[in-house]
Image: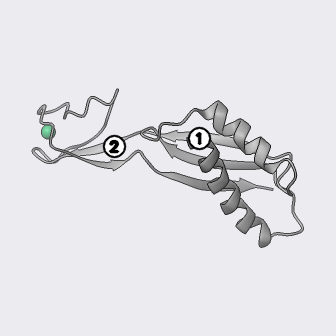
Amino acid sequence: MHELSLAREIVAIVDEIMLQHPEKSLKCVRVKVGELNPLIPDQLQSCYEALIADSKLVGSRLEIIRIPVRAQCRKCARDFRLEQFSFCCPHCESTGLDINSGDELMVSEVEF
Ligand SMILES: [Zn+2]
């Protein structure tokens, strides 16, 4: 399952951060996930909760922030947000696009 491996990745990153702050307890983890990442937020949430049940991260909340997909047109060089994944430049209708963001996953913030 895609969500489970993502949750594992997040827990591994947060575990590393917690090692540097052993005296603190974790409240909230904010992750940024690009809209191109085929993710079901509810599933990621429950995988995360299952993974942290017996760890020192227990009780923390996962906050998922979706990042819009941005692309640049190779023809007219404009930069824009891709809506509904039409993969076509809204200015000149060219389909020669470079995707600049949208499939990333990163832990952006932790709150103690
Ligand atoms: Zn264009």
Q: What residue sits right under mark 1 in the picture?
A: 1
State the SS at label 2: strand
Counting every numbered tag in the picture gives 2
- Residue occupying the point 80% across, 50% down: 52
Furthest residue to the front? 1
In the image, taking residue 28 as reference, residue 89 lies left or right, namely: left
In the rendered image, which quarter is residue 87 located in?
A: top left
Any mark on residue 77, and which? none
The amino acid sitting under disc 1 is: Met
Check the picture and name the quadrant holding the N terminus: top right
Percent x, y of residue 21: 81, 69
Of 91 and 94, which appears nearest the observer?
Answer: 94
Residue 26, percent across and down?
A: 82, 54
Ligand 1 found in image quarter: top left
Q: Upstream in the sequence, badge 1 or badge 2?
A: 1
Distance from label 1 to label 2 (Cα)? Answer: 26 Å
Relative to 40, is 59 above or below?
Answer: below
Q: Nearer the viewer, mark 1 or mark 2?
A: 1
Spot occupied by residue 30 in the image (x, y as percentages of width and height): 65, 48
Quadrant of the drawing holding the C terminus: bottom right
Residue plotted at (31% across, 35% down): 82
User: Left or right of 58: which side holds 74?
Assistant: left
Q: Position of residue 8 (x, y in %)?
A: 66, 53
**SS class, disc 1:** loop
Tell me if residue 23 comes above or below residue 62 in the rendering: below
> Where does label 2 land, which residue?
70
Q: How is the image coloured?
A: one colour
Along the viewing direction, whichever of 51 and 72 lies nearer the viewer: 51
Residue pushed farthest bottom? 20
Asked whether 90 or 15 is in front, the reply is 15
The amino acid beneath tag 2 is Arg
The relative height of residue 41 versus residue 53 in the rendered view (above or below) is above
